[in-house]
Amino acid sequence: MSQSESGFLELVVNWDVSQCRDNLDTALPRLIECFQEINAVQEQVGILKIICHSFLPCVPVSDAEEKVFSRLIDEVCGLFDLTLDDIHLKSQNTDRKSSLPHITSGLQVLLDLLEFLETCVCHMQTGTTPLGWNLVHSLPRGALHILKGAYGHCKISGELYQELLSSLSVPLSNLFKKTHSLQVAFLRLLDCLRVSDPITEQDVQDVTQVCRGLFEVCQIVTSLDMKLVVTLWKAISKHAVSHKAHIGQRLGVGDMVSHLSGEIQTGFTYLLQLIPNVDPEGVVMSQGDEKGFQKSLKILGFQMKILVMLVRDFREFVDRCEDQVYTLIVMFHRLLPPSLSSQPMDQKYVLDIQQHLTNATDVLIKVLLPNKAFIEIVTGSNRVGALEGDRSLGHLQILLKVLDILPQMQDAVQQLWIDPFLYPEDTESLGIIDAVFRTTAKCHVEMSLPVVMNDPSLTGNTDREMTLYENCCTKLCGFLGCLTAKVFHKAEEALMMNVLSHDLWCCLLAEDVWCFLVRYGSADLCRDHVNLLVELMKQSPMFPLQSPLLSVVVRLIKSLAPEDQQEDCRIVLQSELIQRLGACQDFVSLTVLACAVPSFTEANCQSVVQCVTEKCSRVLQDYTSAESMSGGDLYTLSQCLSCLWLLWSQNDTIQLALPSHVTSAITNSVSLLWRGMDPSGWGTAQLPALCLGNLILLTSHLLTSLEMDVLEKILSVIGSCLEQDSSQQLELIIVFFLRSFGNVRLPASPKQPQMLKRLSDLFVTALTSSDLFIHHHGLAAFTKFAEETMHESVVPDCINSQPQLQDFVVQFINKMPFMGSEGWNRLELLRWEPPTDPEVRSDLDCFMDPQVEPSNKRPRLMDDTDQHKMSPKLKKCVKELVLALRKTLPDLETFTNSEATDLNPETWNQLDQIQTKLTAVTKEKG
């Protein structure tokens, strides 16, 4: 510092207020020049103190920006940064203790600079009139810069100072307090500011800069003090909303929403740790922290309100944050009941969390419904396809909430969700209805348990719980009932596609929803749907007897039943349907009639029974009298047997008056089929196995009418089938057949012990099956057989042959869950069992052409999904096979290109080796 400058400073320090005011225009600029020219930090701080205490009070508020702030703020911020850098450098010295005085001195400089900024901020609040943003253009920028630097230094002080932290606790505490004091003063100043009318571009930039700056400060103090966070977010929301029309596009709301979503997720994870820990039986394992829970919940509730406010009020400007909001909502559903991943907790905690947090997600979803990015996230084909584990239930709950809210939205928004028009650059998205079905398939574990939930909006009762399936079905029905005619075709497409799904829950849901729509429509609509579905089934070259369409048709026919005698229209339509289907010669029509018998009036029921049994009886007689048969004949026989079995099965619902002469003819034909059967190949080839299964099912209703030799042949054929590589479906049919054998009484004869031994062996095979499905139904069949049979010796013969069977039977009778050899519980088993891919449809072209002869069973191919499962042993076998093929190929090519009539012995030996290795590969793959 020069002598003249030193003398000037000594002079102005002793001035009183009047002297400062009189010399303001000359002394203040010179002081600022001195500050800018001097390089000594302590002297610069001294000049700032002179300006603050002596000259700033004399500067009118309207002139402070021009005379002081615009010339000093950037210099002060630079000095603050240099001081911080110097402190960081000193703290890195190897001898930290020797640097302690320098660090303490540097912290004092920071305090002085904070004091200067706070004085400037407070000076601007001394006026009585509202301030324009143009009067404080530089001050907010400086205040925010200092706040970020000071809070940031406090945040990293533990890591920075390490063992020196205890020695610096007082200056660091003072630094934090002074920073907070500056923040309070600055927020008060913001409340005094008003934008000009009309607003200028500079005002817009200043307001935007302040809101963004406060957000950056908020990000820093998150881990310091939650009270600061709350205060800052209040200020951000207040000023952002006040100036929304001007700063919305520039504010970057997406970054704020993303940050808040992440903070809420972190806080929510911590919140759950404060809840008392209880085991599944309700025994308290740890007490938790009730006071901490309530405090954390209050803070999270506040953050959630800010999040909702930002998304709601800036919905037009929300971008790049939709995925974070979606993740937050899914997290709530994933960690709270009824999710299988949620921790056991008292219901009061669930209600508190719902009140403060999760109820707000309904608003978020409603606000984001028109958002195209959010639509792509929720209905994106790849996103839905990649769902797994506990995320699937959360995603489904979001979709169900969309179904609730979407009918309230405008047609254009509904169109985006129901039938989206995709541009080439868009993510491939599903319609909302398709997305619900595909996500339902992903929740097969929750559906199967089943998971229960409380939804007062559906039940009107907070105490009534409903299963997840009931919730899905109810909301989907309500949504489809609100659809306009122009998009209803999408619902029809989705229902048809999912009725044919291989996934059980998709199929059931589509069927229930379809029946709901038709049931509450007109009788003519119901009739048209029945006719349409029957014609669709007829168009298949081979009608699948287990087609879900058949179940839908039968349920729709029930809607034509005359529940009210005044419904003459339904009675007429029912009679017309019976006449039309009864006049047809195809088995699709006959099968529909057979399955729908309980839906008809008593008079119509008898006419249906007579029509079906007489036509099927003639087919059986023609088949048993034919000398030869084709694949088409065998398929016709299979349909005929299935139709009769479906008809006889109705005896469980209503008592059918079957004509005695027709029953006798059918029994005779069935006996002839069994007597002439050669069991080899019937349990493996596709069409013969299907036919055999239908024959067994029909025979189970005729057992008491069959002769001894037929029963013996039946047991012999069934035993041969189980010894072969029969399908799970055929094995299950055999188990149901054994269940019906309890009513059979074998007369005393030399063959009786042998037949009872075969029957015992069949039960043992079912009871010891490694297939849990077969094992369970085998236990049910064995238990029923034991209750009804006159041949009690079969029961001990089965149990004595396998000692563990007695324990299985006792557990089954006592309704104890079967744990299996692995000791799995039900939830583990459901999670382990892979669900059927819902995209694999039961298209009717998967059946054999009836004109083609039945072929041998095709070996299972190794698909792409199995490649990574190849064992080392299998890989070695494949390598050996490839080497053998390469070695033999030249000899084979030479033979084919020559006139030789036979291969040489060495080549034949090589071919034998190839066959052996190929067999080894196939066997190893299974």
Image: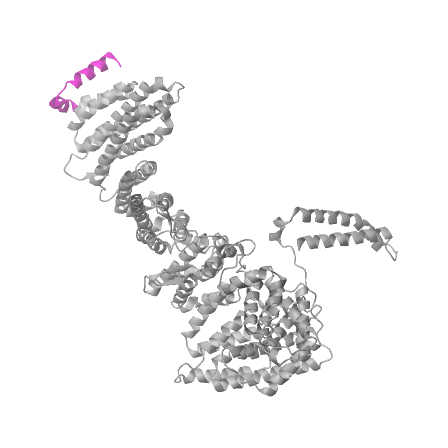
Image position, residue 616 (x, y; %): 61, 81
Q: Give the prevailing secondary structure in the magenta stretch.
A: helix
Q: Which residue is drawn at 58% across and 59% down?
A: 804
Image position, residue 809 (x, y; %): 55, 63
Q: Which residue is drawn at 45% across and 85% down?
A: 572
676 or 869: nearer the viewer = 676
Does 104 sit left or right of 64 as displayed? right
Q: Residue at x 70, y 77 (%)?
A: 675
732, above or below 911, in the image: below
Image position, residue 228 (x, y; %): 28, 38
Residue 680 seen:
yes
793, above or below 572, in the image: above
Residue 685 seen:
no
User: Is residue 350 on the magenta stretch?
Assistant: no
Identify the magenta region: 1-24
286 or 621: nearer the viewer = 286
247, above or below 180, in the image: below
In which quadrant of the rendered view does residue 776 lie? bottom right
749, above or below 466, in the image: below
